[in-house]
């Protein structure tokens, strides 16, 4: 890090300033710092195996064999939150990667090539590389290509899409298919580590991940309350301990303490201590805009608070406790196939309408993410259906999760102002 600071003092200064502008609490900051430090240490220890993974990959298999998970996406998120991604993305494009490709991927590749530390987007080289197409196909090609380029072993987990028209029989076949790959994954990891897989240790790991996820979901449900205990600018960082899943004991301890705090506020405080409903309760669809937290602050100043996002709910995959190894494998496979973030359009519409009712939503922002085409597919159809069935204002916002070149300040602010005005008018007409 000292060498990086000496070589890039301006990047370091701007990055620290940008990251500290995020809605960080001291505990979240400490947890993220701890993960970053342990990521660096793990790659230096000759006896410690590391694995580079992507969102959606069942990390419990790695943890049960003492493989430390490295997340290139998370390091790209760090760079995005710090506001230092553009030169990294442009460097990746200069060596042949298209403008249309994922900005997480290009941030990661650019940072690796420029030898940035993981605090600023540079992923350490892993011993093995693992990906899944559960969320997007780019994950597969990104990690597969990195493994090939760095001459590292690679494993790809193929998760079928539960498309419109699928039924329970097809779902069971899909689960069988994914479970069979879990056994292939176990064999692969045993070969790479020289260790024998222990079902007992795996179950202990899964039990912890289930507990952490259930705590997270219990906290999440309090966002239905009026007012919500936290908003998107904080929730997108609050999800990282369970999303990264590198230290489940720390995640459980943190979420338990936070849940106790929430319960004290909402379940035991006198009603007059709760300030009441937000002026506008907003739902966000899609990945957050990491480099532009000011946008969420500005919305909040206008009375529009983002209280629900399928993006942050989906990150905690484990939603049901299991007791046996075969049951656990099937449940994990089902959770990979049926995550809200990858629903087909038909299920997406009904799911969104359910959440609009549960969270008392006044308006919906759909992020048409130029870096994530799968999550942006069908947004016009989604918008038309929800406006017809629920009659709330909906804004399709064109931007990018990690590439600031795709964010236009003036036009975006104008559209957000119009969106808030539409929610105001909609409320008045209902009154």
Image: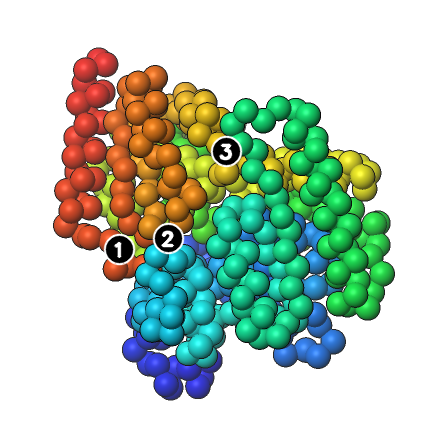
Indicate the colouring scheme: rainbow
Numbered disc 1: secondary structure: helix
Report the quarter where the C terminus lies: top left
User: Local crowd at mark 3 within 10 Å, few (<14), some, or many (≥20)?
Assistant: some
Q: Quadrant of residue 24?
A: bottom left
In the image, what residue occupies the spot 33% across and 42% down?
Answer: 367
Q: Which mark is residue 406?
A: 1
Q: Badge 1: few (under 14), some or many (20 or more) residues near its Cα, within 10 Å?
A: some
Query: CB under 8 Å between callouts 3 and 1?
Result: no
Residue in the picture at 40% in, 57% down? 102
Relative horizontal placement of residue 162, taking residue 118 as reference (left or right): right
Secondary structure beneath disc 3?
loop
Say which quarter of the image contains residue 213: top right
Q: Residue at x 65, y 64 (%)?
A: 154
Helix, strand or loop at mark 2: loop
Give the answer, above or below, for where 125 lies relative to 243: below
Q: CA distance from mark 3 to mark 1?
A: 26 Å
Residue 383 falls left or right of residue 150: left
91 vs 366: above or below: below
Q: Is residue 15 visible?
A: no
Tell me the tag on residue 343: 3
| Circle 2/circle 1 CB separation < 8 Å | yes
**Residue at 51% from the left image edge and 51% from the top image edge:** 137
User: Which comes sooner in the sequence, label 3 or label 1?
Assistant: 3
Report how far apart the C-alphas of labels 2 and 1 lie in the structure: 10 Å
Judged left or right of residue 200, residue 260 is left
Q: Earlier in the sequence, mark 3 or mark 2?
A: 3
Q: Position of residue 123 (x, y in %)?
A: 51, 69
User: Relative to 431, does residue 223 appear above or below in the rendering?
Assistant: below
Q: Residue tagged by mark 2?
A: 371
Q: Position of residue 116 (x, y in %)?
A: 44, 76
Q: Which mark is residue 308?
A: none
């Amino acid at each position: 890090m000292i060498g990086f600071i000496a070589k890039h003092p301006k990047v370091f200064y701007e990055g620290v300033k940008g990251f500290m502008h995020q809605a960080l609490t001291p505990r979240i900051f400490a947890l993220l710092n701890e993960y970053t430090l342990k990521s660096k240490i793990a790659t230096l220890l000759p006896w410690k195996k590391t694995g580079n993974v992507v969102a959606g990959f069942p990390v419990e298999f790695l943890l049960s064999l003492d493989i430390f998970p490295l997340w290139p996406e998370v390091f790209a998120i760090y760079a995005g939150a710090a506001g230092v991604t553009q030169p990294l993305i442009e460097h990746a494009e200069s060596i042949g990667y298209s403008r249309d490709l994922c900005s997480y991927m290009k941030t990661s590749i650019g940072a690796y090539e420029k030898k940035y530390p993981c605090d600023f987007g540079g992923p350490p080289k892993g011993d093995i590389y693992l990906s899944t197409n559960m969320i997007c196909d780019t994950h597969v090609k990104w990690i597969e290509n990195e493994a090939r380029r760095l001459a590292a072993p690679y494993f790809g987990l193929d998760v079928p899409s539960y498309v419109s028209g699928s039924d329970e029989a097809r779902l069971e076949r899909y689960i069988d298919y994914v479970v069979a790959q879990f056994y292939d994954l176990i064999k692969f990891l045993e070969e790479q580590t020289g260790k024998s897989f222990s079902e007992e240790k795996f179950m202990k790991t899964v039990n912890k991940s289930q507990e952490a996820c259930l705590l997270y979901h219990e906290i999440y449900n309090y966002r239905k309350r009026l007012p919500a205990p936290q908003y998107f600018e904080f929730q997108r960082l609050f999800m990282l301990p369970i999303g990264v899943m590198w230290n489940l004991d720390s995640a459980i301890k943190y979420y338990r303490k936070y849940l106790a705090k929430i319960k004290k506020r909402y379940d035991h405080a006198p009603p007059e201590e709760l300030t009441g409903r937000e002026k506008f309760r907003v739902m966000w669809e899609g990945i957050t805009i990491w480099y532009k937290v000011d946008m969420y602050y500005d919305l909040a100043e206008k009375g529009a608070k983002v209280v629900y996002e399928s993006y942050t709910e989906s990150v905690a995959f484990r939603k049901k406790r299991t007791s046996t190894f075969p049951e656990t494998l099937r449940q994990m496979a089902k959770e990979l196939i049926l995550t809200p973030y990858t629903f087909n359009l038909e299920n997406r519409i009904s799911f969104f309408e359910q959440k609009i009712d549960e969270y008392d939503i006044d308006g919906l922002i759909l992020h048409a993410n130029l870096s994530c085409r799968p999550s942006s597919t069908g947004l016009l159809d989604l918008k038309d259906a929800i406006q017809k069935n629920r009659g709330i204002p909906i804004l399709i916002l064109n931007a990018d999760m990690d590439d600031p070149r795709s964010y236009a300040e003036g036009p975006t602010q104008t559209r957000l102002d119009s969106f808030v005005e539409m929610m105001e008018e909609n409320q008045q007409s209902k009154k």
